[in-house]
Amino acid sequence: MPVKIRLQRHGKKGKPFFWIVAADSRAKRDGKFLEKLGIYNPNTNPATIELDVDGAVTWLQNGAQPTDTARAILSYKGALLKKHLAVGVKKGALTEEQAEEKFKAWLEEKEGKIDSKKESLEKAKEEEKAKALEAEKAANAKREAEAKEAEEAEAAAAAEAEAAEATDEATVESAEEEVGAATAEEAKTEDKKDA
C-alpha cells in the first residue's frame, strides 16, 4: 500500500485549515487516513504549524512519500532533518546524543528566526497604527482650522453686515437731513419771492 503524507482540507470557504495526515495514496483527499500527524493553518501570519515530528519521521522511515507542500512543512518543522540525522546514527557517523544536540540547536535557531519575524510584524503593525494616528491628528487639525476660518468668515460677514446697516442708516439720516435742508431752502426762497 503506497502511503503519502499529505494535507487534508478543512475549514470554511475562503478560510482553509489543513490536517497533515499519513494516508493511502488511493484514498480521497479528504477521505480515510491512517494517522493524523498535525495541523497547518495558513490564515495566520506566520502560518501556524503543529506537527508530531517523531510520528512523521517514523512514517518517512517506513517509506511514506510527502507531497510537495507536505515536504515543505516537514522541512520547516525539522522532520526531514531528524530523519537525516537518524540515518547518520544508523550508519555510525553520529551518536544518538550528537544527533539530538544538532537537532535541538537547529530548533533553537529556527525558533529565533520565527520570533524575530513575529517581532518585526508586530513592529510594522505598531508603526502602521502610529502613521494612521498621525494622519488622523493632521486631518482633525485641518478640520478644526477650516471650522475656525468658517467662524471668522461668518464673524467678518456679520461685522460687514452691521457696518453696512450702520452706513445705510447714516445715509438715510443724511438723506433725510439733505431733504429737510432742501425743503428749508425752498421755503426760504419762496419766502423771498413772496416778499
Image (cartoon, helix red, strand yellow):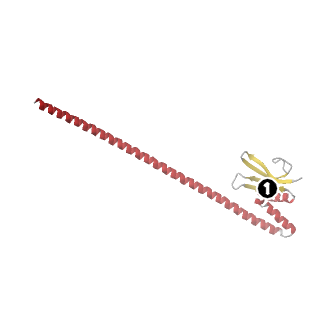
Query: Viewed as shown, does residue 176 lie left or right of 28?
Result: left
The residue that label 1 is drawn on is 68
Q: Residue furthest front?
A: 193
From the viewer's side, name the closer residue of 55 and 11.
Answer: 11
Residue 62 x/y as whole percent: 87, 58
Q: Is residue 92 left or right of residue 124?
A: right
Asked where in the image residue 69 lies, by quadrant, the reply is: bottom right
Q: Position of residue 1 (x, y in %)?
A: 89, 52
Residue 143, image x, y percentages: 48, 48
| Picture coordinates of residue 42, whole percent (x, y) | 72, 52
Outermost residue on the top side: it is 194
For the image shown, how many numbered marks are present on the structure?
A: 1
Judged from the image, the secondary structure of the residue bearing numbered disc 1 is helix
Q: On screen, 88 above or below 18?
A: below
- Residue 67: quarter of image: bottom right
Question: Who's the residue at 21% across and 34% down the image?
Answer: 180
Q: Residue at x 46, y 48 (%)?
A: 146
Badge 1: how crowded within 10 Å, few (<14), some, or many (20+)?
few
Towards the viewer: 108 or 158: 158
In which quadrant will I find the C terminus?
top left
Residue at (78, 65) in percent of width and height: 103
Q: Residue furthest right?
A: 1
Residue 92 is left or right of residue 195, and the answer is right
Q: Is residue 157 left or right of residue 46?
A: left
The answer to whether residue 90 shows anywhere in this view is yes
Corner quadrant of residue 168: top left
The answer to whether 171 is drawn above or below residue 32 in the figure is above
Q: Is residue 36 visible?
A: no
Q: Amino acid at mark 1?
A: Asp
Seen at 76% across and 50% down, the residue is 18
